[in-house]
Image: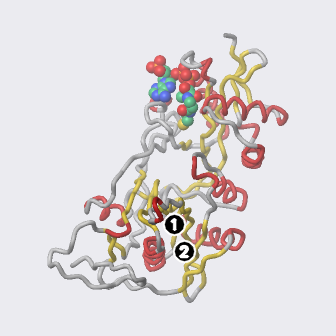
Amino acid sequence: MDLQIRPISEDEFLPYMRAIDAAFSETASDEDIERERRMAEVDRCFAAFDGPEIVGTAAAFTMPMTVPGAEIEIGFVTMVAVRPTHRRRGVNTALMRRQLDEAHERGEVVEVLHASEGGIYGRYGYGLATYGLSIEIETARSAFVRGSEPAGELRLVPRDAAEKAILAVNEATRLDRPGMVRLDERRLDYMLSHEHGPEKDLPSLFVLHEAADGVDGFAVYKVKHDWPQGWPRSVLTVRDLQAATPQAYADLWRYVLDVDLIERVDSWNRPRTSRSCTCCKSRGACARPSWTTCGFGSSISPAPFVPGDMRPMGVWFSRLPTPSGRGTRVGTRSRRRRERPR
Ligand SMILES: CC(C)(COP(=O)(O)OP(=O)(O)OC[C@H]1O[C@@H](n2cnc3c(N)ncnc32)[C@H](O)[C@@H]1OP(=O)(O)O)[C@@H](O)C(=O)NCCC(=O)NCCS
């Protein structure tokens, strides 16, 4: 195999995407390809050519990301793929080397990625930077901490109305939490639309939290309907939930847990230090804590970090009855919820 590694040209983007399809056993739709095209920087889309055929890919998106004490431009590594016919012959190793060299030439000090499999990237100099939590909460077993009372207004809005608010919340919060990226319209569109799997075609729903000074939080979620024999066993998946204040954060969690006809609320890649997750895990309602890799090219920068704690949670989750056996009804809906005793 005579391998050539170089950035692609504009008119090689479609075969580039088809090589990624082959590696992930998928077929991107025209819409998917157009979305990727809007986000991609072709000079950062490296391809490995075996003759005329693209057999491997590795790209990076340039993004402003918060690190402790600063916001810097990083390369978000993505589209890492090698055709199944060309695996285990060093194609990815060659691409990773070229990509890190190019990042270094750009003056980037951090490269970040979210690994689909944790075993791949250590050999290239990446290290685990932080953990993400996946949570699954049975709504019937969720409860709110005593004294947590909703405040402000919640509004369900269409996507175009939500976008401006999401950007404003990102602007207000991202510098407080290392690992957050600065969103703009293009990145937000990508974030909201880039999905795989069976839930891809479900519509996203958008809820905003408004306080006296305006919108200070949002949640983006999907509902997967399941009605066996007419009973609702639907699952609500929180795709994102961000807030500028503890009150908004608590109210938004309360909102998603209070949506009727939902048996379970799922979320993944929540901040590791989120108090909701810690409580949830320790009380047994969190079925699947997990970790994700988010790494640095240690050939560039070895310093790991963990995200800061937003410390906003007025919500606890419990699958246990209160020790006293008494509880107070605090839900805003007919579903009974028990307070957790102090
Ligand atoms: C993962 C992938 C990119 C590796 O490409 P590749 O060209 O086969 O990798 P290389 O031949 O350069 O292998 C380099 C090393 O990585 C190891 N490796 C490859 N895939 C691995 C995996 N999934 N898990 C752990 N190690 C892996 C190889 O065994 C080899 O180990 P060695 O250095 O000890 O010999 C390719 O298998 C692929 O496209 N997989 C499907 C898509 C995917 O998972 N992409 C990553 C998204 S984050």
In the image, residue 102 above or below residue 239: above
In this view, the residue farthest toward the front is 229
Residue in front for this viewpoint, 140 or 78: 140
Question: Which residue in the structure is indicated by mark 2?
Answer: 217
* Front residue (pair 43, 227): 227
Visual colour scheme: secondary structure
Q: Quadrant of residue 149?
A: bottom left
Element type at marker 1?
strand
Q: Nearer the viewer, residue 215 or 231?
A: 231
Q: Is residue 93 visible?
A: no
Going by the numbered disc 2, the residue's amino acid type is Gly
Viewport quadrant of the C terminus: bottom left
* Label 2–label 1 contact, CB within 8 A: yes
**Residue at 76% across / 15% down in the picture?**
51
Q: Work out whether residue 79 can be spotted.
A: yes
Reply above or below: 199 against 250.
above
Looking at the picture, how far across and down is residue 101, in whole percent?
62, 31
Helix, strand, or loop for circle 2? strand
Q: Quadrant of the N terminus?
A: top right
